Amino acid sequence: MDKKVILSGIQATGNLTLGNYLGALSNWVEMQDEYNCYYMIADLHTLTIRNEPDALRKHTLELIALYIAAGLDPDKNTIFIQSHVPAHTELSWILNCYTYMGELSRMTQFKDKASKHADNINSGLFTYPVLMASDILLYNADLVPVGEDQRQHLELTRDIAQRFNSIYGDTFTVPDAYIAKVGAKIMGLQNPTAKMSKSSQDPMDIILLTDSPEDIRKKFKKAVTDSENCVRYDKENKPGVSNLMGIYGMIKKKTMEEIEEEFSGQGYGAFKTAVAEAVVERLEPIQAKYYSLLEDTEKLKQIYEKGDKKAEERASKMISEVYKKVGLVV
Ligand code: TRP
């Protein structure tokens, strides 16, 4: 039986955090044997905000290095750069013609980003979910691992796929969201009621995947907790401690009860040290591999060229089918 197809991507904005790793990359690694996985660098999506051209190029290569360093095997997964496969933008145009302004206007991420970048509310920002739908539908992805913030885009993808299929007959697989078995959303260390975000203004709020062990220790030491001094999971009333427990649990593969047990009778000091050490221990080998890959630009190029080619083969078949269905001469 054919493996189910998974597709996901991360934008090349640089500065990935522990949240990106635990929330996305580490789950992807777990799926690479069971599924036929396509993991792309969503560089075209990154253009919806302004970037320094050199920085975007650099971030794209860094992200590929990080995919590999985090444990994605380029022989098992198709790792590629979105802009290297023209079918993404080609399908995106077609699907734009099957997506309503009203639907796009309802996207909460658009409203949110438009308010944050009031000086650059470009049409790409508006039609961004259609490009994302194209990424997914081109490969007949069955499952799409996404965070909460992308759920609405996935719903829209399903609607577009169903609409197209009902007009032209079965063409696209209607994808489902893939919800990781474990996977608490990682919150900020200083503001544990908001997602740990690379755009946070406060460097103490986030753990970057490239933070040094000293910085990681320092940041966990200063993480906001509460005055109870008891390691107990209670997301409502103890968001800081619960977030640290979530991080520890994901790394150590422990349940919240097991963590409460492990630290019963111990204060926050010992607990925070343990969380910091778990994170350092997990990130150190990833960082070592990441930095050595960054030096080896030839190797990185080989990796994405191989992925680009595999992605291109599959995507170009889909785009010709779509062109034919809508009535273009092919
Ligand atoms: N829009 C996603 C984000 O900003 C990234 C992305 C682009 C994506 N294309 C995708 C995620 C396809 C899943 C599937 O996080």
Image: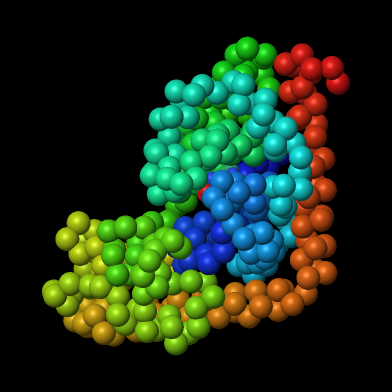
- Number of numbered discs on residues: 0
Q: Residue at x 53, y 28 (%)?
A: 158
Q: Is residue 59 above or below residue 281?
A: above
Q: Which residue appears farthest toward the right when viewing the image?
A: 330
Asked if residue 63 shows in the view, the reply is no
Asked if residue 110 shows in the view, the reply is yes
Q: Which residue appears farthest toward the front when viewing the image?
A: 119
Residue 99 is left or right of residue 297, and the answer is left
**Residue 218 found in image quarter:** bottom left
Residue 49 is left or right of residue 251, and the answer is right
Q: Residue at x 17, y 77 (%)?
A: 229
User: Where the N terminus falls, by quadrant?
Assistant: top right
What coloring was used for the rendering? rainbow
Picture coordinates of residue 169, whole percent (x, y): 67, 14
Toward the viewer: 200 or 79?
200
Picture coordinates of residue 181, whole percent (x, y): 45, 52
Picture coordinates of residue 99, whole percent (x, y): 55, 23
Q: Residue at x 77, y 57 (%)?
A: 304
Q: Is residue 316 above or below residue 42?
A: above
Toward the viewer: 208 or 228?
208
Q: Which residue appears farthest toward the bottom when viewing the image?
A: 214
Q: Is residue 99 above or below residue 11?
A: above
Q: Is residue 86 above or below residue 215?
A: above
User: Where the C terminus falls, by quadrant?
Assistant: top right
Q: Which residue appears farthest toward the left when viewing the image?
A: 228
Residue 135 is left or right of residue 26, and the answer is right
Q: Residue at x 64, y 47 (%)?
A: 44
**Residue 329 found in image quarter:** top right
Toward the viewer: 249 or 155?
155
Picture coordinates of residue 277, whole percent (x, y): 42, 82
